[in-house]
Image (spheres, grey):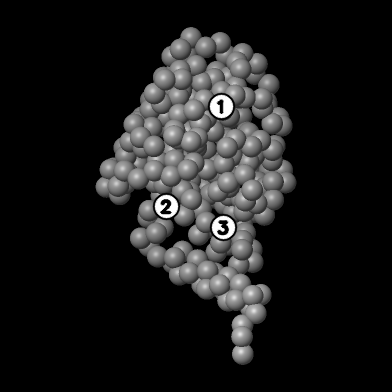
Amino acid sequence: MTMSRKESEQGTQAAERQSFGELMQSKTFVAALVFVLGLAAGLAWIIGDRVINGRPAADASPSATSSPTAGGGATPTGAGSAGVGGDAPSVCSMEAGDQTLPSGALEFRTIQVGGSWGVPEVAGAGPGITTGITRCFAHSPTGALVSSVNFMRWFSSQERLLEVTRTLVVDDSNRQRLLNQIDAGWDGSTTQPQTIRGYRLEVHSPNEVLVTLVTSLNPNDDRFVSWRLVMVWSDGDWKVQSPSSDSWGQEPLESLSGFSTWTVK
């Protein structure tokens, strides 16, 4: 009896679901996911196992007053913590600008930094340094948001990964741990960066903002994952606080409900 096209597709999907589950149980894969921050393959496995297979996802829409460490991610440092230059002037003399919370899609132009991808440049927010690793963002909530997107695009592409980590991550023992993991496990390969699909901000102080970014593999993929990035004003720029554990607080999402929609591809 000849198998119909529909039956063939169902069989393929079932096999893929099984492989998702098997891969997620692999300690090697989970360890690799630590430093690649949701690269294309890793993100597909997370979403496939917890969303495509119909498993209940964790609460994907924490309230504005929720703990910044819920679900993993970096522990907030607090304004004025050791090693954090909260009063440091901008490294590129950028004005702090508007201190209101951003909402909706930000207007931007794309700065090409990779062979076929780029990062957003938002007027008045940065980046102010556009050569090499793009950096230097306004000391404002919008600057923190754009900085977090800049980091996600660079880091998930794996382009110049060690240099990116040294430049865009707060200099502390957690960064060194991350650098050690990258040095031991990264083979120099690169990939297309994650597409930014949305965001939400929680301002903890003028020098610390929790940015939750929503990403997908590409602009047409509605399988979402959220990432909780603690942005700290350090040495005159917004930088990412690397987590002390092997988790960036990533959670699969079924929709963009509760987030401002902003696509950066």
Determine which of the numbered discs, if any, sits on residue 47 in the image: 3
Residue at (35%, 60%) from the top-left corner? 28
Secondary structure beneath dot 1 equals strand
Q: Which numbered disc, 2 or 3, marks the residue that appears first in the sequence?
A: 2
* Residue 188 as seen in the image, left or right of residue 169: left
Which of 87 and 98 lies nearest the eye of the viewer?
A: 98
Left or right for 156, reference 140: left
Distance, label 3 to label 1, CA atoms, is 28 Å
Q: How many marks?
A: 3
The residue that disc 2 covers is: 33
Vertical arrangement, residue 110 with respect to residue 73, above or below: above
Q: Earlier in the sequence, mark 3 or mark 1?
A: 3
Amino acid bearing label 2: Leu
Q: Which residue is drawn at 71% across and 32% down?
A: 104
Crowd class of label 2 (few under 14; some 14 to 19; many from 20; radius 10 Å): some
The location of residue 64, given as percent across then percent down, is 67, 39
* Viewport quadrant of the N terminus: bottom right
Q: Residue under label 1, please give it.
A: 110
Say if residue 72 shows up in the picture: no
Amino acid type at mark 1: Thr
